[in-house]
Image (spheres, helix red, strand yellow):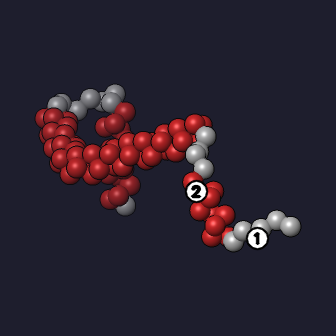
Amino acid sequence: MTPAITIGAFAFALAALPLSAAVSSARAEARAAHGRTRQADEATQRIEPELSALVAKRDKFVAEQRDKAPPKASSFDRVVENTLKALIKR
């Protein structure tokens, strides 16, 4: 007759077994990947306000330069802009 093993004793014995090298390295790689992902997310959150300000500054500069430039009759952007302005006026 075999001795009865309780579930708790089995879980404790199972936890005491060493993990294979493949499983250990896979877990370590997963933890490292998760850490890299968190670092990237935190970096993105830190630079996002500064980046948004720079994009707004660039958009303002481009609009000012476009307004200063003489209109080109063959400019696709100007044709589209004029068409949209005409449609909005309707």
Q: At 68% from the left edge and 70% from the top edge, which residue is drawn?
A: 7
Label 1 packing within 10 angstroms: few (<14), some (14-19), many (20+) = few
Q: Nearer the viewer, residue 22 or 57?
A: 22
- In the image, farthest residue toward the right: 1
Q: Is residue 63 left or right of residue 12?
A: left
Q: Is residue 16 left or right of residue 41?
A: right
The N terminus lies in quadrant? bottom right
Q: At 36% from the left edge and 49% from the top edge, which residue is drawn?
A: 38
Q: Nearer the viewer, residue 79 or 1?
A: 1
Q: Nearer the viewer, mark 2 or mark 1?
A: 1
Examine the rendered structure and indicate whether residue 10 appears above or below residue 25: below
The C terminus lies in quadrant? bottom left
Residue 46 percent location from the top left of the image? 22, 49
Callout 1, which amino acid? Ala
Residue 29 percent location from the top left of the image? 49, 39
| Label at residue 4 | 1
Decide if residue 31 is in sight here. yes
Q: At 15% from the left edge and 35% from the top edge, which residue is drawn?
A: 65
Q: Nearer the viewer, residue 14 or 76?
A: 14
- Mark 2 or mark 1, earlier in chain: 1
User: Can you identify the residue that label 2 sits on?
Assistant: 15
Mark 2: secondary structure? helix
Residue 87 percent location from the top left of the image? 38, 55
Q: Name the quadrant containing residue 8.
A: bottom right
Callout 2, which amino acid? Ala
Q: Is residue 74 left or right of residue 7?
A: left
